[in-house]
């Protein structure tokens, strides 16, 4: 019996592809020289999609896959999946929650430390041999500062734990108050106005597009820092650049961007801004566990077993 056919929509690592090939026949749409020709050839037999957290599965593509049953996302964010369409068509969707939570929260904490203590600038200063000409300027302490988390989910809570250990007080914004010890603030502008660090950890997608706009940045104010480890789409990058240029906010620490992997030159020019190349879950440990879930969900589906980590 032939293995079920899976369409690859992202450049997936070998430690995922190797076990995937044991349970599926892989067709690489992402690297195909002629994707349309590949679809014409194998589209009717594709039963699964494997894709990255940041990749897109447009409805126009899914409509060309009549035998499609399941989309397995190699990532926790599934904002690239048209969920309502999948639900209507009875398609299953899986993601890779929990196994990356601590590593992403570590990067958020690193961005808080790097922005407050100016570590990126200080490292460049030391490397450039500038120390003999004078000491590096003083930076800001973390203890006693206030942090506001936008989206207190798995990652948001792990960030809150780390911030608490560093002596910051925590409030959060989301669609619902939760049974936690942190203070819920149902008004995003009010949260931004009262904190030193506004930390974005909610899902991307249309529901949160440009949630952090010029007015939220104005509320955050001149002693405020924006941290984003969630999705680039959540922050209006043009408004952010303008806020940085005008001193509306102090600085920003960003792991995600609107047009990854391309960064706006205006953002790169800001010495105080810390920019990371979307490496929140970028550890051997997290990516291997994510790969096991991504493949495990497809294997479970085709074996008629319950999905390991279903979204729908
Ligand atoms: P999660 O457990 O589902 O948490 C998401 C939180 O966001 C929930 O607490 C939810 O609370 C809140 N939320 C949802 N919609 C919201 C809205 N419109 N406004 C404000 N808050 C909203 O997800 P997670 O595992 O923590 O992951 C969060 C996100 O991190 C992912 O979706 C992904 O995009 C991103 N991520 C980034 C990296 C990276 O490498 N940088 C890695 C992994 C994940 P309510 O329901 O109460 O609103």
Image (spheres, rainbow, N blue to C red):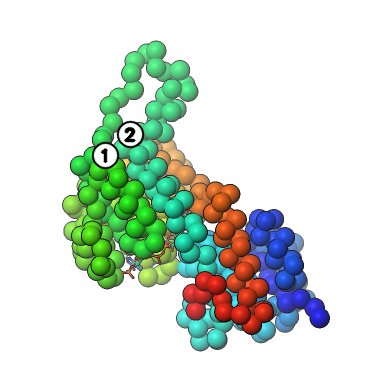
Mark 1 secondary-structure assignment: loop
Give the image quarter of residue 302: bottom right
The residue that appears at 76% across and 76% down in the rendered structure is 3
The residue that appears at 72% across and 60% down in the rendered structure is 18
The residue indicated by pointer 1 is 142
Q: Of all residues shown, which one is farthest toward the right? A: 1
Q: Nearer the viewer, residue 232 or 167?
A: 167
User: Compared to 203, does 192 lie above or below?
Assistant: above
Tell me the quarter of the image containing the N terminus. bottom right
The residue indicated by pointer 2 is 117
Q: Is residue 61 visible?
A: no
Q: Position of residue 198 (x, y in %)?
A: 29, 52
Give the image quarter of residue 201: bottom left
Q: Distance from label 1 to label 2 (Cα)?
A: 9 Å
The residue that appears at 60% across and 72% down in the rendered structure is 297
In the image, taking residue 3 as reference, residue 204 lies left or right, namely left
Q: Is residue 307 visible?
A: yes
């Amino acid at each position: 019996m032939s293995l079920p056919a899976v369409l690859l929509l992202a450049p997936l690592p070998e430690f995922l592809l190797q076990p995937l090939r044991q349970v599926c026949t892989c067709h690489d749409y992402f690297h195909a020289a002629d994707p349309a020709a590949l679809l014409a050839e194998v589209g009717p037999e594709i039963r699964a999609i494997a894709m990255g957290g940041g990749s897109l599965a447009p409805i126009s593509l899914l409509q060309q896959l009549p035998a499609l049953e399941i989309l397995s996302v190699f990532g926790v964010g599934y904002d690239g999946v048209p969920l309502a369409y999948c639900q209507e068509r009875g398609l299953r969707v899986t993601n890779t929650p929990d196994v990356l939570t601590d590593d992403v929260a570590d990067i958020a904490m690193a961005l808080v430390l790097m922005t407050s203590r100016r570590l990126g600038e200080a490292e460049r200063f030391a490397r450039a041999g500038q120390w003999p000409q004078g000491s590096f300027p003083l930076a800001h302490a973390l203890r006693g500062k206030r942090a506001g988390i936008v989206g207190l989910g798995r990652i948001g809570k792990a960030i809150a734990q780390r911030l608490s250990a560093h002596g910051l007080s925590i409030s959060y914004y989301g669609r619902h108050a939760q049974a936690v010890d942190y203070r819920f603030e149902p008004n995003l502008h009010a949260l931004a106005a009262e904190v030193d660090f506004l930390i974005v950890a909610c899902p991307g997608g249309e529901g949160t597009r440009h949630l952090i706009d010029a007015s939220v940045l104005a509320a955050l104010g001149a002693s405020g820092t924006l941290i984003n480890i969630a999705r680039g789409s959540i922050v209006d990058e043009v408004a952010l650049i303008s806020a940085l240029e005008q001193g509306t906010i102090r600085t920003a620490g960003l792991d995600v961007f609107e047009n990854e992997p391309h960064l706006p030159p205006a953002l790169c020019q800001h010495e105080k801004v810390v920019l990371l190349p979307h490496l929140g879950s970028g550890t051997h440990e997290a990516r291997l566990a994510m790969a096991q879930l991504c493949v495990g969900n497809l294997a479970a589906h085709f074996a008629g077993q319950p999905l390991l980590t279903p979204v729908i």
